[in-house]
Image (cartoon, grey):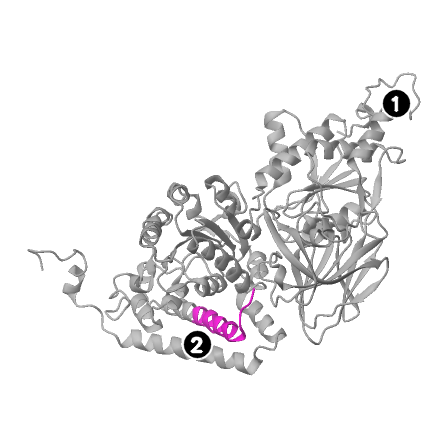
């Protein structure tokens, strides 16, 4: 597997952008500035940056509820995403999508279904469209270990396989579905094993190693693009924060969190960059500062942006057709 | 005492995507362990220790046996703190060795056995393959593994048990011993560990093997395609690959995947011979998995050692046991200890 030094540096910057954005969102939520609930992906940056690396323009990506980071990499600007979290009119979805439903379909970011584990049937429609239109693109659906146990996921995997669709099912096993340990909610430890039941390959890879993520996604995506059909790629990772901001996490131990903090995906990439003399510590600091400045600007943009006007609440509800404005 | 180490992580790597590798689910590992435990239970033996793991293979197997066969196999979990990586197998092997295990049954691939071999000392291994591209462990029915374990436990004088000492390769980085391989050490041009498994032959630079088999998959098969070397041969093989070579061979690199491999050169390696790796940077892959990155500042050496783990020859051991009457039921009356020596011995029961 080859990843150029320039790409390694980009991946490093992308991972810091996600980390900084999520940490800022955590701070703002704690201050009561952000409405609603937010679910943050601190600790899961490697799977987002690595998956994004393997995506091509025109692909359709269905994210889950913890993927602000992937939305940023797919093209929602940090300012537009932060404004969306604030519920501002300048948000990526005019403040009406919020954390969970922010999307940018023109860049392939399909957003998240309100019911986790339901998008895995819907994704087949995108896959089918790519297949019949011969776009050479693929559809990717991302879901967690909790959603993986829902019936729709199995229905979706079966249909994708029956129709040999260019769909890749990415399972992010971050240890917990809300507060339920994935070790207690499934009879298989590696959820990729489910693929065997639907006649497709399934692999499990280290979700905290961005290069392992790139290798697994690039092979799965290539297979789908070339007509090889669907597959399941599972990433083992861990969310450093709770299920939602404010979650006191009584269901997990301090030791477990500490063990995973040692496997921090950014620290692991930093070690590779230093060992390989790709960049030095000063350059690393500069990259970090650059991403911090982007997040500062995003926050400022969101703060000064207006809230939507009252009538906007009725906008985008119905499709326009003759006889109705 | 009989030890069991079942690795819950083997059997799901990237070769499912790039080749036609079979997914080896953990429920099947539980089934295999059930078959092993049933056989050991039938012999009257009760002293079984097993590595704990996050999937609870031991607990699930014991519970299933209670439910289905109504037997309580009394498996004890080893007192180790597991971290869900290969170090668990090493820790478990070390403890089983200290506790005086008569044998260790392993469920896993070459990687699992490598982790066990680092710390199992002279305790003989009974290996069951549950990984991919395996050369070291056997595709073995769990029932036979259980029978061989009973022979190992009862036959402390080694009348029946046939054990072979395997070779291994020691790896040194900047003159410091860092790791071992049981079958192969590949030096690749890969810069990253990534998804670990080796499947791009074009990345191969050098290869050293303890065993070169034409009838297996992966690295050992590359060497086996030009110069077969057996487990008991007093040498290994060293090969240089890549452009500039004149010889090309067809090799089964992964399940269902025949590929052309180009050689520059190959030669036998003697026991205790040390070779300095020629590549100036890249990755050392041990038994098919990228493990140790090295740069231009590092010096990597590999050494063929005769001190690999002891492995039970199942076929020969069970045949010898059968010839010695080990499987004939005896009531023990009027017989000497040696004569009453048998698969089932109620007086050995440790409730």
Q: Disc 2 on helix, strand or loop?
A: helix
Residue at the disc numbered 2: A291
What quarter of the picture does the C terminus of chain A occupy? bottom left
Q: Is residue A15 magenta?
A: yes
Q: Position of residue B77 (x, y in %)?
A: 69, 42
The residue carrying mark 1 is B340
Residue nearer the viewer, A127 or B144: A127
Query: Looking at the image, which is closer to me, A132 or A201?
Result: A132
- Name above or below for residue A151 compared with residue A125: above
Decide: is B344 above or below B199: above
Judged from this view, the residue extending furthest toward the left is A323
**Which of B124/A159 is in front?**
A159
Tell whether B157 sits left or right of B117.
right
Report the span colored magenta: A1-20
Q: CA distance from mark 2 to mark 1?
A: 77 Å
Quadrant in the picture for residue B187: bottom right
| Letter of the chain that mark 1 sits on in the rendering | B
């Amino acid at each position: 597997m080859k990843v150029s030094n320039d790409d390694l540096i980009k991946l490093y910057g992308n991972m810091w952008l996600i980390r900084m954005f999520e940490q800022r969102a955590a701070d703002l939520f704690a201050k009561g500035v952000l409405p609603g609930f937010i679910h943050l992906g601190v600790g899961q940056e490697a799977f987002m940056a690595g998956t994004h690396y393997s995506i091509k323009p025109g692909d359709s990506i269905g994210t889950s509820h913890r993927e602000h980071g992937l939305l940023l990499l797919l093209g929602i600007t940090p300012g537009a995403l932060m404004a969306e979290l604030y519920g501002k009119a300048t948000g990526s979805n005019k403040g009406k999508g919020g954390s969970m439903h922010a999307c940018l379909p023109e860049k392939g970011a399909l957003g998240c279904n309100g019911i986790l584990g339901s998008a895995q049937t819907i994704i087949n429609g995108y896959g089918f469209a790519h297949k019949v239109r011969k776009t050479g693109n693929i559809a990717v659906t991302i879901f967690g270990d909790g959603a993986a146990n829902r019936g729709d996921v199995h229905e979706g995997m079966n249909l994708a396989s029956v129709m040999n669709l260019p769909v890749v099912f990415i399972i992010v096993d971050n240890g917990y579905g809300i507060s339920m340990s994935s070790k207690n909610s499934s009879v298989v430890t590696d959820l990729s094993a489910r693929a065997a039941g639907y006649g497709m390959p399934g692999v499990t890879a280290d979700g905290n190693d961005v290069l392992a993520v790139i290798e697994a996604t690039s092979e799965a995506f290539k297979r789908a693009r070339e007509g090889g059909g669907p597959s399941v790629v599972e990433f083992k990772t861990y969310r450093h924060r709770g299920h939602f901001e404010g979650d006191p996490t009584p269901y997990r131990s301090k030791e477990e969190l500490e063990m995973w903090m040692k496997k921090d995906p950014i620290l692991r990439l930093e070690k590779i960059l230093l060992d390989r003399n790709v960049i030095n510590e000063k350059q690393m600091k500069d990259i970090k500062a650059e991403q911090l400045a982007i997040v500062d600007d995003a926050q400022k943009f969101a703060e000064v942006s207006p809230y939507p006007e009252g009538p906007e609440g009725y906008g985008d509800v119905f499709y326009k057709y003759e006889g109705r404005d | 005492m009989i030890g069991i180490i079942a690795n819950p992580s083997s059997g799901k790597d990237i070769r499912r995507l790039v080749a036609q590798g079979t997914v080896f689910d953990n429920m099947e590992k539980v089934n295999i362990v059930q078959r092993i435990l049933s056989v050991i239970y039938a012999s009257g033996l009760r002293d079984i220790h097993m590595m704990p793991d996050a999937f609870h293979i031991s607990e699930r197997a014991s519970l299933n046996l209670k439910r289905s066969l109504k037997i309580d196999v009394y498996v004890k979990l080893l007192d180790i703190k597991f971290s869900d990586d290969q170090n668990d197998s090493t820790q478990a092997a070390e403890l089983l060795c200290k506790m005086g295990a008569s044998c260790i049954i392993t469920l896993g691939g070459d990687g699992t056995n490598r982790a066990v071999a680092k710390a199992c000392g002279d305790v003989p291994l009974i290996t069951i393959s549950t990984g991919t591209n395996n050369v070291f462990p056997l595709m073995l029915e769990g029932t036979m593994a259980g029978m061989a374990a009973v022979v190992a436990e009862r036959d402390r004088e080694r009348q029946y048990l046939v054990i072979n000492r395997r070779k291994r390769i020691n790896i040194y980085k900047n003159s410091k011993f860092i790791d071992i391989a049981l079958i192969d050490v590949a030096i690749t041009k890969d810069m990253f560990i990534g998804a670990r498994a080796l499947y791009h032959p074009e990345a191969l630079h050098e290869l050293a093997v303890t065993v070169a088999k034409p009838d297996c998959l992966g690295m050992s098969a590359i060497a086996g395609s030009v110069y077969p070397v057996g487990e008991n041969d007093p040498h290994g093989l060293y090969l240089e690959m890549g452009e500039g070579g004149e010889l090309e061979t067809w090799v089964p690199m992964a399940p269902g995947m025949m590929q052309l491999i180009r050689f520059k050169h190959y030669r036998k390696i003697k026991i205790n011979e040390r070779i300095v790796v020629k590549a100036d940077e890249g990755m050392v892959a041990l038994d098919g998995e990228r493990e140790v990155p090295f740069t231009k500042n590092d010096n990597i050496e590999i050494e063929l050692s005769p001190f690999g783990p002891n492995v039970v020859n199942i076929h020969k051991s069970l045949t010898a046991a059968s010839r010695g009457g080990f499987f004939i039921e005896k009531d023990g009356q009027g017989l000497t200890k040696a004569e009453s020596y048998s698969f089932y011995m109620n007086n050995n029961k440790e409730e």
